[in-house]
Amino acid sequence: MLTIHHLHAGIEGKKILKGISLDIKPGEVHAIMGPNGSGKSTLAAVLAGRKEYEVSKGSVEFLGKDLLDMAPEERAGEGLFLGFQYPVEIPGLSTTNFIKTAVNEIRKYRGEEPLDAVSFLKLMKEKMALMNINQSLLSRSLNEGFSGGEKKRNEIFQMAMLQPKLAILDETDSGLDIDAIRIVANGVNKLRSKDNAVLLITHYQRLLEYIIPDFVHVLYDGRIVKSGGKELAFELEEKGYDFIKNEVNITEEA
Amino acid sequence: MISDIKYLTDQFEQLQAEKKDGRLNAVRQEAFRTFSKLGVPTSRHEEWKYTRVGSLFNKEYRFRANPEGQDLDFFHLPGHEQANELVFINGRYDASHSCVRSAALVVLPLEEAAKNEYSDILKRHFNHSANYLKDGIHALNTAFVEAGVFVHVKDRRIAEHPIYIYNIADTREEQVFAQPRSLIHVGDHAQVQIVEIFSTIGNLESFTNQVMEIIAEAGSNVEFYKIQNDASHNSQVSTTHIRQVGKSYTHTVTISLNGGIVRNNLNVILEADHSESHLYGLYYQKGHSHIDNHTIVENVRPDCFSNELYKGMLDENSTGVFNGKIFVRQAAQKTNAYQSNKNILLSENASVNTKPQLEIFADDVKCSHGCTVGRLDEEGLFYLQSRGIPEKIAKSMLLHGFTSDVLDKIKCQPIRAYVDQLISERLQFDNI
């Protein structure tokens, strides 16, 4: 589904990603972990199409198409979703109006008719229940004055509404208490299927207790330095990132 | 040319000879003296530093033009079937095109009101704005005051229909210089909504120099909306001077969407304890248009509240000015006065000069001010795009969102819908 090949990228001349390769197949959940500054969020941003980042080398193929060649909205149209670490507050734009526009623009991209008001409402009600979101939140300006937990739930709610093929969740767990993590994880788990995939970016192992990954990758200094099954996350939690750093440094010295 | 003092003097003498309205004659005389002394402001005048009006005066206009237009077919605001409509054509109140529906209103020619039971109100309030606007342009309006209108909202009455005021320039045959003048007196515990709009019929240039004075008595509630969406060959200086002489509530929203050179003076004088005033503005300009909002909030008495929010979007080569003064006099303890001006520049060539100015002589007050000038929020844009919304639509949604808190302040529903539609259409079709 997603094939990242030897990706190099940076911002304002600073190299951040230094050769990342990753292959994600339908039905899989991958987790990318790593210490601060290792390039986790940069990877998410590059995949979603933030224009401040420059890709200097490598390629990314998404469902057989060149992802890096597409505008952010085209990537969404193809079925990519980025859950933001810091969802943006948009004053004066109601959440409902925003989601309706997004749903219908994506349908338009795929050559489908826009959802009529009744079907849209039905879909929204269903996903609201899933994410424990009430109507009053949706009539407010997008993310404006939302609590940290509300913002993150709103991200997963949007994901539920847009039904992406690949969801990249950038530190969706950061700043959440345990109840909020459960709700978010529950939302993600309900949306898992054999046809779609999830890329979780996280600093802590905690979220992975609720969303069990098939693969865990450790990102350090712009490279994936270790990959493994879900047990790698537990090992990291136990030993901290230092053991990875030491391993890497030893290898480099050798 | 209006900049030709000989021409103006002749015109002035002719007007004074025609009119025999005692009090107004004296006011005009005084104002003409002021105009002769001050002349047209140049950019050396502190209040006119960024708004150059000199060239507007170096043109041939039809001055003191009579309204011809019995055949005049003009745009009516939505909801006009349920509104009181007052029409000024080329600066002169035209009763034949006007329509007064509310029994709560008395509408009279200014000259007539100066002679009857309302003469006392005129004596106390007419041209009070001259105390705050010391420039030749304001004086010029007063020097040539004629065919103005006086509106009285009766005590303890609610004007159930809004008052729509049309300032129309008819330039089908000649360029026009128009100077509408009005005095609106809102009586004790009375309530009224006022909407004014400026429009030009014809393709020639017009210059409107308008002054409106509003007096809010005790317990009154006044909503005032100004809509400026005239063509780019139509310029205006538009003054609204509000005196809150009793404990009262006023609420103004100024929407400026198009025009040549547009200068607004909005003064709110809080002369009674516990008065409250809200001032909102939204400007969205493009082409070479210039929008200047000068506001004054004067706190004379204690315990007053004012809140001011002006927002602007400037595109292409347009320029903007915001100057917001707040005065808190020594007696005005416990004043709460807030002010904010936020701007988005949509092109490299657009610019804005924004200047808050607070002068506080009391020691127990809460005042704040702030201004921002920035570009469209890139973070927000990416967020919307990442959800599948194309860049152009995303931009227009963000900008519409930016305008919404000011639009929400328009409490007259047909007008709110009308302005929202104008902005939405612009956002949809402009190449932002």
Image (spheres, coloured by chain):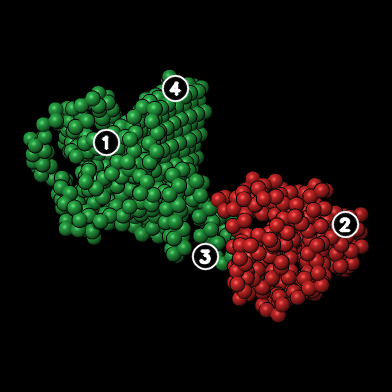
Chain colours: A red, B green
Q: Name the residue carrying label 1.
A: B107
Instruction: Give the distance between the C-alpha atoms of the residues marked 3 and 1, in whole angstroms.
Output: 48 Å
Q: Amino acid at mark 3?
A: Lys
Q: Amino acid at mark 4?
A: Asp
Q: Quadrant of the N terminus of chain A?
A: bottom right
Q: Earlier in the sequence, mark 3 or mark 4?
A: 4
Q: Which numbered disc, 4 or 1, marks the residue closer to the eye?
A: 1
Q: Quadrant of the C terminus of chain A?
A: bottom right
Instruction: Give the distance between the C-alpha atoms of the residues marked 4 and 2, in whole angstroms.
Output: 63 Å
Q: Which numbered disc, 3 or 1, marks the residue closer to the eye?
A: 1
Instruction: Give the distance between the C-alpha atoms of the residues marked 4 and 1, in whole angstroms.
Output: 29 Å
- Identify whether B38 is placed above or below A129: above
Q: Quadrant of residue A166?
A: bottom right
Instruction: Give the distance between the C-alpha atoms of the residues marked 3 and 2, in whole angstroms.
Output: 41 Å
- Identify whether B301 is placed above or below B94: above
Question: Mark 2, chain letter?
Answer: A
Q: Earlier in the sequence, mark 3 or mark 1?
A: 1
Whether residue B19 is visible, yes or no, is: yes
Question: Mark 4, chain letter?
Answer: B
- Residue toward you, B357 or B180: B180
Query: Residue A71's x, y, as percent?
Result: 60, 70
Q: Quadrant of residue A60?
A: bottom right
Task: Confirm whether circles 2 and 1 share one chain.
Answer: no
Q: Secondary structure at mark 2?
A: helix
Q: Name the residue carrying label 4.
A: B273
Residue at the (78%, 55%) spot, across then down: A184
Query: Residue B260's x, y, as percent?
Result: 30, 54
